Amino acid sequence: AQVARLPERPRPQQLDTEMAQLRVQRLRFEDLLSKQPQLRQIRQADGQPLTSEQNKILQAQLRTQNELLNSLLRGGDTLMLELTKLKVANGQLEDALKEINEATHRYLFWTSDVSPIGFSWPLEIVQDLRRLISLDTISELGKASAMMLTSKETLLPLFAALLLVGFSISSRRHFTRFLERSSARVGKVTQDHFWLTLRTVFWSILVASPLPVLWMTLGYGLQSAWPFPLAVAIGDGVTATVPLLWVVMICATFARPNGLFIAHFGWPRNRVAKAMRYYLMSIGLIVPLIMALIMFDNLNDREFSASLGRLCFLLICGALAVVTLSLKHAGIPLYLDKEGNGDNMVNRLLWNLMLGAPLVAMLAAAVGYLATAQALLARLETSVAIWFLLLVVYHIIRRWMLIQRRRLAFDRARHRRAEILAQRARGEDEPVHVSSPEGSVETEVSEVDLDAISTQSLRLVRSLLMLIALLSVIVLWSEIHSAFGFLENISLWDVTSTVQGVESLEPITLGAVLIAILVLIITTQLVRNLPALLELAILQHLDLTPGTGYAITTITKYLLMLVGGLVGFSMIGIEWSKLQWLVAALGVGLGFGLQEIFANFISGLIILFEKPIRIGDTVTIRDLTGSVTRINTRATTI
């Protein structure tokens, strides 16, 4: 509760804008002062000098202007000084709030914030519910609504949102017809186009937006009713649930029979229907419960969190478990392997994690760790949302590649048909494939296997999206990284380090080991996918001699392995300064026993750069002839 009462972080952009405006005003005032000597020499309209009376009035006006301008300059300087002090104070406040938040995450994140559930908990719920009603809830909401409807700042956005909702309802028939027309063209080589998918995505998002916009407008209006704390807390809850409501409605629009998931992605209709089985429960139960949970967290120092707030959270966890089980039975993949298949061990592990997370959160909230369970479950569900968004992006890119592949195959078939017809017109004998007794030429293109569509490009897209997902999840969870500071207190072993000739023992903690494992995992992904990205994005567009690109990607792979390995092992105390003597000794010892292997390694490097042979060359060794298929540093495959 004390952390919840902390002030919000200041916004330095407003101070910077005001200070910039003050500087501009000062320059304008100084410019007016510099023009006063010219004004003293002013003449009449006919060029005659001013009379003594006119000159006296002019001098008085100039003195008054001079005094006012100097007063404005002094006031501006004083205001600039105060704004500078305020900016410094805001910076100190922001640093203090950051330290408090980090200390809170480090020392209070894993401590219970409410009492465990006991036999008296149902009675507490009833008592708090009566107390909430006794706060004159209906009257406060009525006054807040009246304030919202009488203020121009909230009435105009609310009226615009209502018009948008009405327009959306009236245009749903046109949107349905658009989906029918576009889905009828999907899959037909001569009519299908990637623009159909982009238009479907755009219009689906647009159709799903009015209700979230209205919901956000209501939340903003309630937040503006500052004299009524209950209305402000409800507004905070309404505003916080806008992204969830928008995502759910977009998914529902995508899941229409002629929508993106079924018509464009080719997902089975029954699976999509299973996934959207609990759509109404998500809209009618989960969203209001999250709104109520956030309201109780922001109302009266969280006095209702232990009872009503925890009840809402337990219901949310149960609903999430039901929805997750439905999505798992629908067969939606959370991870695709190299072949683009979702039936793998990683996918099953992720789904089991998603199923177990709400149940573990329920248990944690029941024993008193309510805030901890809320923070972890919210970030876990957000991570899944990011993952699903990238999955949709992957299928959009995959559909674009499918359209391009089908069009290329159709063009080749059409050219082949033209050649056959030309040969028949010349009377030449050419075997013609017929599809009917009348001898009509077969022009239909067989359905293209998705796994055969630019396999390397699809694999590269999957790898890039995996890296994006990993980075996004790291950024998301970095907000509470200090909560895992206890891992730095778990020492596994000690290593000896030398700093300026002084040896000291440094502990290797569990946190350092986990970070090292993460670095090695990222390095492995980079080694697998970055050379292909380098080849497709850069090297193929350069005028390189044959084999040079392969040499560059191979060396890049080895450099990534070397750098990632050194960084990862240095985090667990295995530094290069300790390894170099061991490497030197092993080099001398192995140089005799593995002399041929090291010679082959150096020879492989020479072959990569001097390129006496290249991939695809035909090589004859004694009585054997073959083509070069792979060139590695230790061996060349023929």
Image (spheres, rainbow, N blue to C red):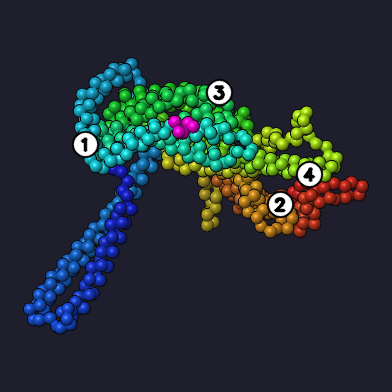
Q: CA distance from mark 3 to mark 2?
A: 46 Å
Residue 501 visible (yes or no): yes
Q: Are marks 1 and 4 in contact (CB under 8 Å)?
A: no
Structural distance between the alpha carbons of marks 1 and 4: 80 Å
Vertical position of residue 130 compared to residue 418: above or below: above
Most foreground residue, 527 or 187: 187
**Of callouts 2 and 4, the N-terminal one:** 4
Q: Picture quarter containing residue 286?
A: top left
- Residue at point 65%, 47% (across, down): 532
Q: Which residue is mark 3?
A: 270
Q: Tell me where residue 506 appears, x and y as whole percent.
A: 52, 46
- Which residues make up the magenta segment? 173-177
Q: Secondary structure at mark 4?
A: helix
Q: Is label 1 in a helix, a strand or a loop?
A: helix
Amino acid found under the numbered disc labelled 1 = Met
Extreme-top residue of the structure? 119
Which of the two discs, 2 and 1, labels the residue nearer the N terminus?
Answer: 1
Does label 3 or label 1 sit earlier along the sequence? 1
- Residues under labels 4 and 3: Cα distance? 48 Å
Quarter the N terminus occupies: top left
Q: Nearer the viewer, residue 160 or 251?
A: 160
Q: Is residue 300 visible?
A: no
Task: Please report whichever mark, 1 or 4, sits nearer to the chain's N-terminal start.
Answer: 1
Identify residue for label 2: 550
In what element is the residue under mark 2? Answer: helix
User: Label 3 to label 1, Cα distance in Å?
Assistant: 48 Å
Task: Farthest residue to the left: give it.
Answer: 53
Q: Earlier in the sequence, mark 4 or mark 3?
A: 3
In screen coordinates, is 163 left or right of 171? left
| In the image, residue 15 lies in the stretch drawn in magenta | no
